Image (cartoon, rainbow, N blue to C red):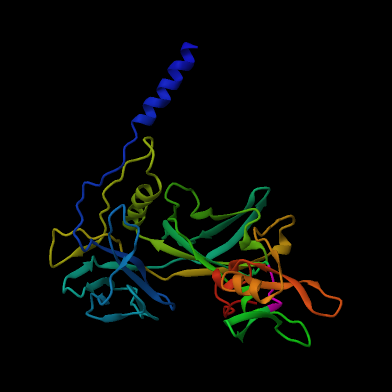
Amino acid sequence: MKKLICFLFLIIAIGGCKEKYVSPVISPTTGYLVVEGTINAGNTTTEIILKRTVKLDNPVIVFESGALVSVLGEDNSIFPLNENGSGHYLGSNLTLNKAKKYKLHIQTKDTKVYESDFVEVRNTPAIDSISKQYTSTGLELFVSTHDATGLTKYYQWDYTETWEYHSPYKQLVTYQPTNTPSGIKYYLAYFDPVLVSFNSAIYTCWPTENSSTIISGSTVTLTDNKIFLPITFISKGSVKLSQLYSIIARQYSLSEGRYNYLQKMKKNTEGTGSVFDAQPSELVGNIHCTSNATEPVIGFVDICNIQEKRIFINNTELPDWNYKTPCLKTEIVNNIDSITFVHDRFYPIDVAKLSPFGGILSYYFSSPSCVDCTFFGTNKKPSFWP
């Protein structure tokens, strides 16, 4: 009994030691500049994202718009990046000389100037494969690569997932407005009065999701310059693999400085919250405010060609995936008053009962998100989709 009491006291004591982390850094009203992205020396697009830091209790992302962003070479070459959407600055097919060094130059709309250190152009080896392992709990995806030259020791990956999504219910009927003495009311109608079809524009969609964690790896301590590591896991029964799924992985060659920077960032963002976790450490990147040397800037810029690889996975490859929709349908009597009551809150699905004379006695309806796939993604088929 004494041992149990001591054990409970220890748990309470440990729990009592937890305190909310309060950052010692006092951010200005506008927040410090955050620079995200890699300068792409290959034949695809360079994207640099500018944001501002926010308080811990304010989750709203603040993008930095109206800046002048460019890549400057030590040979005085200039490659401007154009803003495409709030805080996103793009440049296509930058023809960078691998024998030269380059830096990122930023002038914000308040005329402050920020620059990175000059960095060399790194070569990224190709992704060898994206492989999968199917278990009783779900599907794990792995990326593998190697560098025969032995020059690349540090790597980073990110990815974008896209999947085909079918609405749980097809919409075979629709509401139609009609004028009555008491105002506009609604009645039920087939989409096609001759041949019952369905509203295909809201049945098939393609949601997209980007990776949200830092994925990095190193071969420094390995005898072979090869890497094989997991990049994502999809829980069994997930909607992502209910039909057809695709993932495109992007691979970056990192400098040792950026690799160490990402390791600290990973600890700060993913390893805090417990008394046993590492405490947040200071992030020191290679970007500086040249107009105010004391102002902190968050970010680390590298330059490399970005390698990509895409795979598709069909639901038929995964026996017993068991995706189940949480959607339910409800039956309602087909009359003007009932339909008018629900028409702006629920979508009609199909006929439930027909009268002996061919009329609709009742029909099924469900919540909009169970009928209209555009709640989750675009109904425009991606160009890469088979």
Q: Can you tell which quarter of the image residue 332 is in? A: bottom right
- Image coords of residue 261 (percent x, y): 32, 54
Q: Main secondary structure of the magenta part?
A: loop
- Image coords of residue 334 (percent x, y): 71, 73
Q: Compared with residue 353, is residue 76 higher up or lower down, i.e. above or below?
A: below
The outermost residue toward the front is 181
Is residue 204 shown left or right of residue 9? right
- Image coords of residue 27 (percent x, y): 21, 56
Q: Nearer the viewer, residue 186 or 189?
A: 186
Residue positioned 68% across, 75% down in the render = 171
Q: Nearer the viewer, residue 10 or 356?
A: 356
Residue positioned 57% across, 83% down in the render = 184
Residue positioned 52% across, 60% down in the render = 145
Residue 193 visible to an observer of this rendering: yes
Is residue 182 shown left or right of residue 359? left
Q: Can you tell which quarter of the image residue 196 is in? A: bottom right
The outermost residue toward the top is 2
Residue 302 visible to an observer of this rendering: no
Q: Is residue 127 magenta?
A: no
- Image coords of residue 371 (percent x, y): 63, 70
Q: Can you tell which quarter of the image residue 318 is in? A: bottom right
Q: Which residues are magenta?
A: 169-173
Q: How many circles with numbers are drawn on the protein?
A: 0
Q: Nearer the viewer, residue 201 or 44?
A: 201
Question: On the rendered image, what quadrant is the C terminus found in?
Answer: bottom right
Q: Compared with residue 131, is residue 269 higher up or lower down, i.e. above or below?
A: above
Q: Compared with residue 160, is residue 182 higher up or lower down, i.e. above or below?
A: below
Is residue 218 shown left or right of residue 54? right
Residue positioned 18% across, 59% down in the render = 28
